[in-house]
């Protein structure tokens, strides 16, 4: 080491996460695909029902301007529904504007961006200090990827959901301490850029209670990064820009109304 070149820099989970985040800050755009699955058992006053939900689709992102575009299909087993969804999110100054289309109806909402909360969440979930680096790399196509894993405990999960308060409005005052999340991050060895991130969440069996309703669920979300710096721009449609504004805390209610409308149409067709 004294004479130089006699030793190699040690690769650790923490150093990889730090480097991949530094590299992502330089990325101008990326594309990817996602697959989210959720199984729930919802009970209230002794009545329980099972429901499976899933969403598959694509995602694209540009850094300047900062816009995310997600497009996919959402399936709800209990209602027998399969719905197309289209969503844009643009961050400007200290606010984020979200445009969402369901059943060919656009709506938009604005939320504040709490920079301190974002930084707190970054420190909790993404600094790599609690992640484990696998001894062997994994092949993704013809490329090698590092594999990092970690487990987020209920207390840590509760803290993360707390700093995400602006992003979780409308879900009620829920106790997330019974949750556990297993995180797997794969990083391309040649570029030190993300290949995929998956999060598998489950509760301890006791579920999550809010306003007399108990929800027990398992969730698996997978994000695969397909390409970097290949998107020149993302254009938000005119009909989205002209959509009616909805309070962010009420956007879930608007989605429920659209779902109820679709259920009613499905029942009418069945009759």
Image: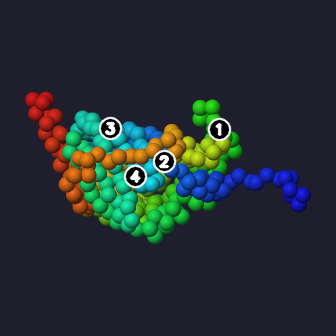
Q: Residue at x 13, y 29 (%)?
A: 270
Q: Which residue is mark 4?
A: 67
Q: Which residue is mark 1?
A: 144
Relative to 121, 20 lies left or right: right
Res. 29 mark = 2
Q: Earlier in the sequence, mark 3 or mark 2?
A: 2
Structural distance between the alpha carbons of marks 1 and 4: 30 Å
How packed mark 4 is, by other alpha carbons closer than 10 Å (few <14, some 14-19, many 20 or more), is many
Check the image and report above or below for 114 versus 132.
below
Separation (CA) of disc 2 from disc 4: 9 Å
For mark 2, does the 10 Å Cα neighbourhood hold few (<14), some (14 to 19), or many (20 or more) residues?
A: many
Helix, strand or loop for disc 3 = strand
Residue 70's quadrant in the figure? top left
Residue projecting furthest to the top: 270
Q: Nearer the viewer, residue 181 or 33?
A: 33
Indicate the position of residue 230 as horizontal and vertical percent values: 50, 41
- Of residues 53 and 145, which is closer to you in this image? 145
State how far apart marks 3 and 4 are (Cα): 20 Å
């Amino acid at each position: 080491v004294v004479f130089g070149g006699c030793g190699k820099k040690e690769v650790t989970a923490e150093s990889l996460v730090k480097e991949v985040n530094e590299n992502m800050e330089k990325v101008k755009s990326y594309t990817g695909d996602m697959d989210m699955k959720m199984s729930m058992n919802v009970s209230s006053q002794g009545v329980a029902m099972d429901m499976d939900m899933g969403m598959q689709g694509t995602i694209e992102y540009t850094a300047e301007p900062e816009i995310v575009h997600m497009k996919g299909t959402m399936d709800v087993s209990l209602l027998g529904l399969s719905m197309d969804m289209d969503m844009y999110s643009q961050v400007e100054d200290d606010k984020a504007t979200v445009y969402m289309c369901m059943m060919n109806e656009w709506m938009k909402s604005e939320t504040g961006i709490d920079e301190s909360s974002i930084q707190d969440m970054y420190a909790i979930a993404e600094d790599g200090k609690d992640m484990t680096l696998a001894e062997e790399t994994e092949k993704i196509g013809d490329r090698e990827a590092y594999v990092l894993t970690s487990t987020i405990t209920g207390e840590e999960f509760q803290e993360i959901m707390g700093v995400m308060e602006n992003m979780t409005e409308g879900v009620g005052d829920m106790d997330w301490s019974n949750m556990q999340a297993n995180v797997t991050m794969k990083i391309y060895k040649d570029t030190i850029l993300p290949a995929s991130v998956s999060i598998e969440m489950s509760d301890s069996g006791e579920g999550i209670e809010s306003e007399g309703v108990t929800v027990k669920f398992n969730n698996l979300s997978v994000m695969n990064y397909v390409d970097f710096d290949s998107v020149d721009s993302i254009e938000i449609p005119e009909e989205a820009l002209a959509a009616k504004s909805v309070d962010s805390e009420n956007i879930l209610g608007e989605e429920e109304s659209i779902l109820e409308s679709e259920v009613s149409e499905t029942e009418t067709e069945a009759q």
